[in-house]
Image (cartoon, grey):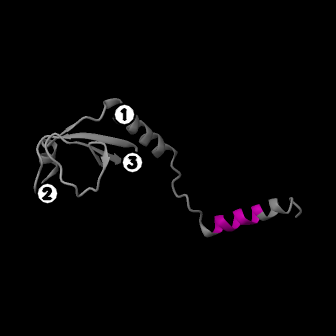
Amino acid sequence: MRVGGVEVKASRLVRAGDLVEVDRHLLVHRLRVLEPIANRVGAKLVAGAAEDLTPEEEVRAAREEAARRRENRVVGAKPSKRQRRAMEAFLDEVRRGGEG
């Protein structure tokens, strides 16, 4: 998290007009504080306290990248015990040069 370009802890108090940058996964959100909030509030009230300055093309690119990563994700990546033993037997055979 950065406030005014300076890296700070998330507990840092902000003032109206501060520019806040938050690194979140594939995107850096840029926000201008309009009205600081003293207490925890619901998401609907937070939207009125800050102006989102994140460029739309960056948001779109991050969404596309996230979708691409979801498509390429291997589901069930951990092999079963039986599959692992079969792979190990195959690799052992390859290492020995296919000698039987």
Residue 83 in the image, given as x and y percentages of width and height: 65, 64
At 55% from the left and 58% from the top, the residue drawn is 77
* Residue 25: numbered disc: 3
Magenta-highlighted residues: 82-91
Q: At label 3, which amino acid type do we have?
A: His
Q: Secondary structure at mark 2?
A: loop
| For residue 32, above or below residue 96 | above
In the image, residue 8 sits, relative to residue 33, either above or below, namely below
Q: Spatial distance from mark 1 to mark 3, Cα to Cα?
A: 12 Å
Q: Which residue is mark 1?
A: 58
Residue 21, quarter of the rendered image? top left
Q: Say which of 77 and 82 sits in front.
A: 77
Q: Amino acid at mark 1?
A: Glu
Mark number for residue 88?
none
Q: For mark 1, does the 10 Å Cα neighbourhood hold few (<14), some (14 to 19), or many (20 or more) residues?
A: some
Image coordinates for residue 49, horizontal then vertical, percent = 13, 43
Q: Residue 88 in magenta? A: yes
User: Pointer 2: what residue?
Assistant: 40
Which mark sits nearer the N-terminus, 1 or 3? 3
Q: Quadrant of residue 56?
A: top left
- Amino acid tagged 2: Arg
Between 59 and 100, the residue placed more toward the observer is 59
Neighbour class for label 3 at 10 Å: few (<14), some, many (≥20)?
Answer: few
